[in-house]
Image (spheres, grey):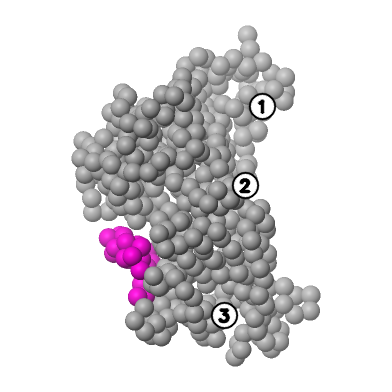
């Protein structure tokens, strides 16, 4: 008898059969500290040890997508492993069949080679986490997968996205590819009907994660776009409930770099498959030429000395409320040619003031303000208007316009609020990478704040250093500009 045997429990979980000591080893192997656990109230109050455990020793079950890691676990320890045949998720699907199928869809433009390969890999393996950079056309890949499943024996499907704006965008994207979205797609979020007989439900994770368990059992497949954005607990609730979904495909432009994040997503969807990279797409002229101008604002010695006593929140407060800094951003935006996106973090403290300041001096230029409270239909109309404009300005919160929103005719992106989040930064950069009829190049203006004095380095400047590391990893071209901020 093998040391470890894997049985299929359902489409979400597998069960492992082994001695208790091996089970404990397996549990330890799949146990990790959650990033930032030490700041969570439950940890501080000693109600939680800060760890996530992917192997359940009560039910001897683990996420289906972690089978490759279990194989690695056994190989490292010389344990024999037996996997039931029904655990396998692969199927035969030739490149010729795929090409013929895609041809039959009569897409409005030719599918790219990496998109076709990603589609084939998804159908063959049924469970994947597709890693493909922002602006690489993930919605077209998802569309091909959906059409293939609809042409086979699938009855119902679920497509989950992080925001209501993306629900509407997916709906319209599919229609632009030739799909009868009205006939086959149900959009579900606040104010919309929960139940439907339509083939595909497009929704946000926030709209459905509290639904009863049997709600999720109706789906034959589940797709997650921008999967890195989903709150872990909500995502596990949804994917664990989809016990009949044979196809589980997640897409993301970036992972946050932590092992915990990757393994949770791979466990729920499947192994990572890298489609292409931003650098490759730029080189092939499939994305806009992209450069970064790092604008490092230097403050007076008086302010730098004072900043040494600030905590992080006090530093942020000073930065976003600083009139000279906001006037600098206003003047920068108004000096740029083309359509510009100004991203901010705080609505009341920063975003509204920036918007009013820019709009007051913008003359006849169109200036839009978008934040979480902006109606989804208004957001979609702003996106559509910007596609037709040549010098529009959008002042938007990171949460609404940093992820997934497709504006091809965007020439400039400005980071007006400091952040070190790898995911947020790369997703925000993606807003400027799409090619458009009036656009071949895009520029990111990364604004950093330098309060250094002596050996002291401030918090947000350290975050800027982390962003530069990301630019190096992604092989982006960037240049530093030191600017003395007057009256600050």
Please provide percent x and percent y for residue 470.
64, 56
| Residue nearest the observer in this picture, 31 or 342 | 342
Q: Is residue 131 left or right of residue 104?
A: right
Residue 73 tag number = 1
Q: Is residue 368 left or right of residue 121?
A: left
Reading the chain from its start, which is encountered first: label 1 or label 2? Answer: 1
* Mark 3 element type: helix
Answer with mark 2 or mark 3, whichever residue precedes in sequence.
Answer: 2
Q: Report the number of numbered marks.
A: 3
Label 3, label 1: how far apart the Cα atoms are: 50 Å
Residue 459 percent across, percent down from the top left: 66, 70
For residue 318, the mark is 3
CB atoms of marks 2 and 3 within 8 Å: no
296 to the left or right of 366:
right
Residue extent of the magenta highlight: 366-389
Residue 258 — which label? 2
- Secondary structure of the residue carrying numbered label 1: helix
Residue 234 numbered mark, or none: none
Q: Residue at x 50, y 67 (%)?
A: 413
* Crowding near the residue tagged with mark 3, few <14, some 14–19, many ≥20 C-alpha atoms within 10 Å: few
Q: CA distance from mark 1 to mark 2?
A: 19 Å
| Secondary structure type for disc 2 | loop
Residue 426 lies, with reference to residue 116, above or below; the image says below
Q: Position of residue 488 (x, y in %)?
A: 60, 87
């Amino acid at each position: 008898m093998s040391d470890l045997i894997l049985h299929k429990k359902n489409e979400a979980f597998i069960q492992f059969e082994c001695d208790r000591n091996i089970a404990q080893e397996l549990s330890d192997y799949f146990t990790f500290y959650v990033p930032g656990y030490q700041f969570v109230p439950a940890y501080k109050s000693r109600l939680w040890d800060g760890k996530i455990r992917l192997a359940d020793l009560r039910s001897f079950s683990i996420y289906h997508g972690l089978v490759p890691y279990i194989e690695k676990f056994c190989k490292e320890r010389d344990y024999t492993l037996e996997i039931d045949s029904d655990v396998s998720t692969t199927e035969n699907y030739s490149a010729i069949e795929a090409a013929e199928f895609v041809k039959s869809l009569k897409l409005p433009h030719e599918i790219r080679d990496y998109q076709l390969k990603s589609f084939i890999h998804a159908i063959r393996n049924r469970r994947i986490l597709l890693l493909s950079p922002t602006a690489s056309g993930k919605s077209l890949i998802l569309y091909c997968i959906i059409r293939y499943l609809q042409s086979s024996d699938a009855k119902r499907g679920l497509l989950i996205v992080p925001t209501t704006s993306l629900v509407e965008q997916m709906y319209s994207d599919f229609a632009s590819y030739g799909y009868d979205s009205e006939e086959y797609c149900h959009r579900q979020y606040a104010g919309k009907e929960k139940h439907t007989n339509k083939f595909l439900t497009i929704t946000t994770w926030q709209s459905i994660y509290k639904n009863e368990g049997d709600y999720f059992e109706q789906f034959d497949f589940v797709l997650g776009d921008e999967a890195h954005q989903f709150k872990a607990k909500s995502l596990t609730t949804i994917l664990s409930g989809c016990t009949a979904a044979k196809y589980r495909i997640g897409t993301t432009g970036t992972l946050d770099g932590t092992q915990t994040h990757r393994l949770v997503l791979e466990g729920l969807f499947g192994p990572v498959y890298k489609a292409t990279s931003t650098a490759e797409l730029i080189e092939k002229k499939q994305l806009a030429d992209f450069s970064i101008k790092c604008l490092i604002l230097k403050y007076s010695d008086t302010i730098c000395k004072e900043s040494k006593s600030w905590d992080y929140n006090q530093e942020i407060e000073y930065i976003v409320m600083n009139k000279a800094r906001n006037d600098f951003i206003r003047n920068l935006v108004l000096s740029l040619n083309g359509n510009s996106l100004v991203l901010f973090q705080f609505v009341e403290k920063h975003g509204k003031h920036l918007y009013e300041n820019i709009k007051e001096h913008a003359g006849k230029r169109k200036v839009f303000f978008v934040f979480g409270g902006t109606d989804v239909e208004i957001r979609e109309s702003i996106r559509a208007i910007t596609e037709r404009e040549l010098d529009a300005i959008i002042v938007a919160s990171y949460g609404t316009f940093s992820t997934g929103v497709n504006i091809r005719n965007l020439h400039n992106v400005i980071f007006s609020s400091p952040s070190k989040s790898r995911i947020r930064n790369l997703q925000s950069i993606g807003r400027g990478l799409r090619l458009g009829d009036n656009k071949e190049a895009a520029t990111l203006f990364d604004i950093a704040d330098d309060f250094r004095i002596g050996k002291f380095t401030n918090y947000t400047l350290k975050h800027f250093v982390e962003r530069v590391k990301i630019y190096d990893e992604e092989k982006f071209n960037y240049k530093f500009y030191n600017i003395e901020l007057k009256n600050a």
